[in-house]
Image (cartoon, rainbow, N blue to C red):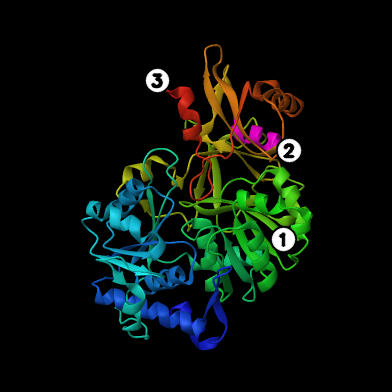
Amino acid sequence: MADFMTAYSLTQPDKLAVIDDRAGAGVRTLTFKELNERANQMANALLGLGARPGETKVVWCGQNSSGLVVMINAARKLGITAVPLNYRLSDEEAAYVTDHCDATIVYVDAEFAPMFSRIRGDLPKVTTYLVFDGEVPDGMVDAEALMDAAGTGDPDLPEATEPGSTMIYTSGTTGKPKGALRRGGANPAQGLALMQHIGYVPDDIYIPTGPLYHSGPGGFMGIAQTLGQTVVLQRKFNAEDWLRLVDTYKVTSTFSAPTPIRLICNLPEEVKAKYDVSSMKRMVANAAPWSFALKQMYVRDFPADSLWEVYGSTELGVNCVLKPEDQMRKPGSCGQPAPMVEVKLFDDDGNEVTGTGPEATGELFVKSPSVFADYYKQHDKFLADQKHGYQTVGDIAYRDDEGYIYICDRKKDMIISGGMNIYPAEIEAALEHHPDVIEVAVFGVPSEEWGESVHAVVVLREGATASEEDIIEFARQHLAHYRVPKSVTFIDELPKTGSGKILKRELRAPFWAGRDSKV
């Protein structure tokens, strides 16, 4: 079967495939014909460097750019494994991922090439460092010059070559990150069913609201390109500039974690009024749970029928979908199982939970064609997360009487206080309704009396004056007494992973220091 990018280069050669708009630094564009040729040049250059389908792994690293889109398509065409690297990682973390995945080639934008100069001594398997979009350090290769010298035709590959694999390393909120390996392309039938369910069309214009190394923005860009849509790239997120891009290019589709949208909705009204966002038709909410308060903010500023929510993960793909008409009707729900996805809840003894309501919680397990293949070199962890042929990432959930799923929390985040199971997500959702609160993280801290007590770390709006007593009193008005935080601290910014997940382990660590047990 012909590669879809090759097909689009013939059927819609002059349609814009990528708009790389860098505020103040010009606009770079690629038509489908140009993108296909550049991806072929990269694939042919990689073949010249010794890359082999089904064997070679290449790490790519950089902020959103047309250069990344070229590599993503080249790796798929060539049948090699692409490993996105979070550019926010420390040197030690970047070295771990690059070495652990057995990459022999690194493709990095010039801004982050110095990091690889610092750690290359820790990467004995890497033979080539390809640098694009800027100055090339000594000992590294100019990727764009290498591509310019390569042929623009499709790479010459064996007929049985499968589309390239991906291996995304999970955020690593506990312990070392794990490489979630997906072999070959996505299941075509399931992908098509999800596209039809959400209503994507070829004329959509997609902007990834977040870094492409994250499975959400990057994965939904894959959907956009599969359908031949135009993709608009923002190199690094800025709230007002994002509005400019939506207005300028009449963007219809995106995927976003809660933090960027919260920043957009919190812009002054006079700033938001300068931009027309009525073109937005498909805002897919996820990466971390959107609170009901944030959804209310969103529908005040954007078309109400544009808000979709998906529940999923790097490992399991998209598992549940909540439609626009259910956003206000089903607060706290992540929707019903997505097309071709089976969802089951199991208790700690392996028994299926079939009841409904918050009292009938269980660990959520999934079976679908989109479940990942394995944790690279950590098969034991893959097996440990299986039950009866279903896979989990450790989320606790329940169903209501209409079959809608509600995620209570990650299993490891559960607080047990005085014998009561408490899920932080419920408390966080309540506290975000406080007018002075921007963000909040809740977790358990040691208590001689209760085993654990509920603690909240709060980020206040600029100029807000809410005190610990104010936050606790607000919680009393909205939560059962055993869920009310016993203590509150304030912080300017919550620590997060590159994908936007709050690093609760960093917040919890001082409270549990010196103890053998962390619960």
Percent x, y of residue 388: 44, 43
| Residue located at (59% from left, 66% from top) | 207
Residue 351 visible in the picture: no
Tell us which disc is closer to us: 1 or 2: 2
**Range of the magenta residues?**
423-432
Q: Alpha-carbon distance for marks 3 and 2?
A: 35 Å
Q: Main secondary structure of the magenta part?
A: helix
Is 321 or 22 nearer to us in this picture?
22
Residue annotated with mark 1: 306
Q: Is residue 502 at least partly visible in the picture?
A: yes
Q: Would you call the spot at circle 2 few (<14 residues within 10 Å), some (14-19), or many (20 or more)?
A: some
Residue 57 percent across, percent down from the top left: 31, 62
Question: Callout 3, which amino acid?
Answer: Gly
Q: Which residue is mark 3?
A: 514
Which tag, 1 or 2, sits closer to the chain's start? 1
Q: Is residue 106 magenta?
A: no
Q: Which residue is mark 2?
A: 433
Quarter of the figure that contains the N terminus: bottom left
Tell me the distance, in whole angstroms, between the alpha carbons under discs 1 and 2. Answer: 22 Å
Give the image location of residue 78, x and y in percent. Answer: 34, 73
Query: What amino acid is at disc 1?
Result: Ser
For label 3, the SS is loop
